[in-house]
Image: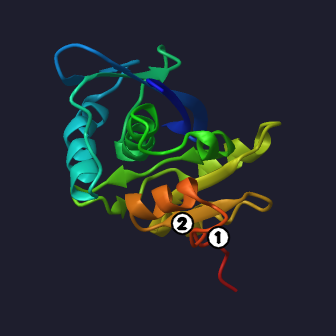
């Protein structure tokens, strides 16, 4: 497969609007292009994603990679798109099955080693996701998942690394499931 689609959210004020992260791999000079009104933080994800994939022992494809963050007229800010971009690259290059991507939404900033860093707006993401008719499970960095779990009825999973998320998606019945975030009593 040379195209993958991953769901995420963009924070705009108090709202979290749905964003579709489309990743296309093509022949040509290797490089990664981001389109869809990304700000500087999102543009810098190119290097974070490349390093995180390589340090997690995945192959960064030596192909022309185009990442479209749709809708194009919605400004995208923050590092929360690192995780969906990385998963899209892995799915488009055949290193990760895309079947699990359809039933989840993802947000998370990647460190260069593949660890997930907290993101802002987790509560808004869970609330907006739950309000839609086709509510999915939300996968966030463990540090952000507790905040999102405050939304009653939302299915929220916390992960510590890119490898944790990939193991969960590759074989959800065999791999250790991501811990579900719960509100502490």
Relative to 146, does residue 58 appear above or below in the rendering? Answer: above
Nearer to us in this view, 91 or 155: 91
Residue at point 77% right, 37% down? 132
Residue at point 48% right, 48% down? 107
Residue sitting at the far right: 133
Q: Evaluate if marks 1 and 2 touch, with contact meaning CB atoms under 8 Å apart.
A: yes
Which part of the image, by quadrant, shows the C terminus? bottom right
Residue sitting at the far bottom: 185
* Neighbours of disc 2 within 10 Å: few (<14), some (14-19), many (20+): many
Indicate the position of residue 181 as horizontal and vertical percent values. 62, 71
Does 65 sit left or right of 177 as displayed?
Answer: left
Does 158 sit left or right of 82 as displayed?
Answer: right
Q: Which mark is residue 180?
A: 1
Relative to 168, does residue 103 appear above or below in the rendering? Answer: above
Which comes before the other along the chain, label 1 or label 2? 2
Indicate the position of residue 89 as horizontal and vertical percent values. 38, 36
Indicate the position of residue 102 as horizontal and vertical percent values. 65, 39
* Neighbours of disc 1 within 10 Å: few (<14), some (14-19), many (20+): some
- Which residue in the protein does label 2 denote? 158
Residue at point 59% right, 42% down? 101
Does 22 sit left or right of 78 as displayed?
Answer: right
Q: How far apart, in angstroms, are the residues tagged by discs 1 and 2?
A: 6 Å
Nearer to us in this view, 110 or 4: 4
Q: Secondary structure at mark 1?
A: loop
Q: Quadrant of residue 111?
A: bottom left
Does 20 sit left or right of 42 as displayed?
Answer: right
Residue at point 66% right, 65% down? 149
Relative to 88, does residue 116 appear above or below in the rendering? Answer: below
């Amino acid at each position: 497969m040379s195209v993958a689609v991953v769901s995420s959210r963009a924070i705009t004020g108090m709202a979290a609007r749905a964003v579709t992260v489309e990743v296309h791999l093509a022949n040509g000079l290797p490089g990664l292009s981001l389109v869809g009104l990304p700000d500087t933080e999102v543009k810098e994800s190119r290097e974070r994603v490349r390093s995180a994939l390589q340090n997690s022992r995945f192959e960064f494809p030596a192909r022309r990679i185009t990442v479209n963050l749709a809708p194009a007229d919605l400004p995208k800010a923050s590092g929360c798109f690192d995780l969906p971009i990385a998963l899209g690259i892995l799915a488009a290059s055949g290193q990760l099955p895309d079947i699990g991507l359809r039933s989840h939404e993802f947000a998370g900033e990647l460190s260069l080693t593949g660890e997930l860093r907290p993101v802002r707006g987790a509560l808004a993401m869970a609330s907006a996701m739950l309000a839609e008719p086709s509510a999915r499970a939300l996968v966030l960095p463990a540090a952000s998942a507790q905040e999102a779990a405050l939304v009653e009825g939302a299915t929220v999973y916390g992960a510590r690394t890119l490898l944790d998320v990939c193991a969960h998606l590759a074989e959800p019945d065999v791999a250790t499931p991501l811990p579900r975030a719960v509100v502490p009593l």
